[in-house]
Amino acid sequence: MTAVLDEAADAALLEVLLTPEGRADPYPLYRLIRERAPVLHTSLPDGSIALTRYEDCIVALRNPHLGRGIVGPNARPARSALPGAADPEVRAQFFRRAGESMLFTDPPEHTRLRGLVSRAFTPKRVEALRPAVEAMVAALLDEMAERAEVDVMDVLAFPLPVAVIGELVGVPGPDRAQFRSLVRASTAGLEPFVDNDAILTAVDAQQQMRSYFFDLLEERRRSAHDDLLSVMLETSESDDRLTDDEIVSTAILLFGAGFETTTNLIGNGLSALMANPTQFDRLRADPDLTASAVDELLRYDSPVQMNSRTALEPADVAGVALEQGQTVMVLQGAANRDPARFDDPDRLDLGRRGNAPLSFGWGAHHCIGAALARMEGAVVFRALADRFSSIEPTGEPVERRPGITLRGVVNLPVSLSPR
């Protein structure tokens, strides 16, 4: 098929990308786009196409002719500014710095960087962490149980994953809290359309994190620890395979991504369970549902809603011939609600079989920490179901994070009834 330029579908996409109302509940808009123009030729200035069907999205994410395209000879051009969006020259400042991260590199650079750190996230290594994570969760829930009302984001959804990834990467405990605001400011640069101020704030946050990790790297040179930062430093000194810039960029990525996704999984997942109390009761009654419940919560309200790929050379995606440098918007949140892949996709079903959400991406850039996030999610939701007979919204306003790439809430006030 060919990409379709459909005014209603295009308007729905712009509503998702640009408006708080569209981002608050994008799923009806995704459905409209998929029904009217599943391969949408957008009106965006860069001529990108948008994919909403599961099969099209997974094929695009697997396609070796598509890449991140931020740096190198196939770097995609800066996005032309829509009204109110950052100037291309300002946005380029963010990508010049972010382009050093493996998140924005293509093979062979990406393969080399990923191979050097993947050993820290093997299923065996992740499973070995489970007892420590269970102990952390138990302690945090003990504190929650002493109070009738809590903000889950403050007392659980942020402290747990930042502690876990902090230990892995090597960020000392007292230093971790500052990264909540720094990482959040930096990830604003990942959004398709933000203004100049947001980009400049993201660049400043990046620089603060770089300065911190360069200082920490020097400490590890003087005294190695049992952490990933020390392992990367040892690798660079023995094989000359990692520069200091690469170590620091990789450490920032792993640390930030290591808690951002899991924090949003906990917040989005608990929100979904509170909105579907019969499913929460189902989880309480059947511990064997825990693993499938995590995948279903990831599918139902994905912490990562969209991704992008760039044609590294002329390529074909969903029957559309792409020119080199053309952008493909992979709407993972839409793919996770595709009725051709998931029966009754707007229904939360913790026992859903054959579930394979695209929430962690796919292909070469599949999230390296996916197994860790799933394990943390499984421990958290199992413990919440076992520890509390009810968890309900307090009725206080919930602030949603701006943007659509990373979906989550800033706060989640709940009332608790311990068992």
Image (tube, rainbow, N blue to C red):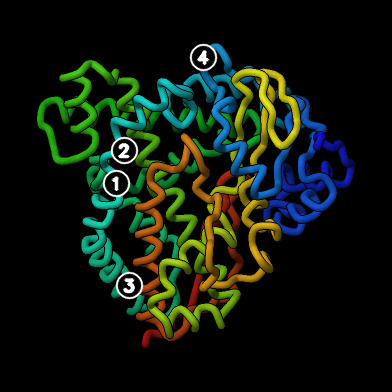
Residue 122, labelled with which disc?
Answer: 1
Q: Position of residue 80 (x, y in %)?
A: 73, 23
Label 2 or label 4, whichever comes before in sequence order: 4
Disc 2: which residue: 118
Q: Nearer the viewer, mark 3 or mark 2?
A: 2
The amino acid at mark 2 is Ser
Q: Is residue 345 visible?
A: yes
Residue 72, labelled with which disc?
Answer: 4
Disc 3: which residue: 141
Label 3 or label 4, whichever comes before in sequence order: 4
Mark 2 element type: helix
Quadrant where the image shows the N terminus: top right
The amino acid at mark 1 is Thr
The image quarter in which residue 396 lies: bottom right
Report crowding for label 4: few under 14, some 14 to 19, many 20 or more residues within 10 A (C-alpha): few
Q: Residue at x 40, y 62 (%)?
A: 377
In-image side of 245 versus 69 (left or right): left
In the rendered image, the vertical position of residue 178 relative to residue 64, given as above or below? below
As measured in the structure, the alpha-carbon distance from the residue carrying label 3 to the one carrying label 2 is 31 Å
As measured in the structure, the alpha-carbon distance from the residue carrying label 1 to the one carrying label 3 is 28 Å
Nearest the eye: 304 or 55: 55
As measured in the structure, the alpha-carbon distance from the residue carrying label 2 to the one carrying label 4 is 23 Å
As measured in the structure, the alpha-carbon distance from the residue carrying label 1 to the one carrying label 2 is 7 Å
Report crowding for label 1: few under 14, some 14 to 19, many 20 or more residues within 10 A (C-alpha): some
Asked whether the residues under the numbered discs 1 and 2 touch, taking CB atoms below 8 Å apart as contact, a structural biologist would say: yes
Mark 4 element type: loop
In the rendered image, the vertical position of residue 369 relative to residue 152, given as above or below? above
Residue 312, labelled with which disc?
Answer: none
The amino acid at mark 3 is Leu
Q: Nearer the viewer, mark 2 or mark 4?
A: 2
As measured in the structure, the alpha-carbon distance from the residue carrying label 3 to the one carrying label 4 is 47 Å
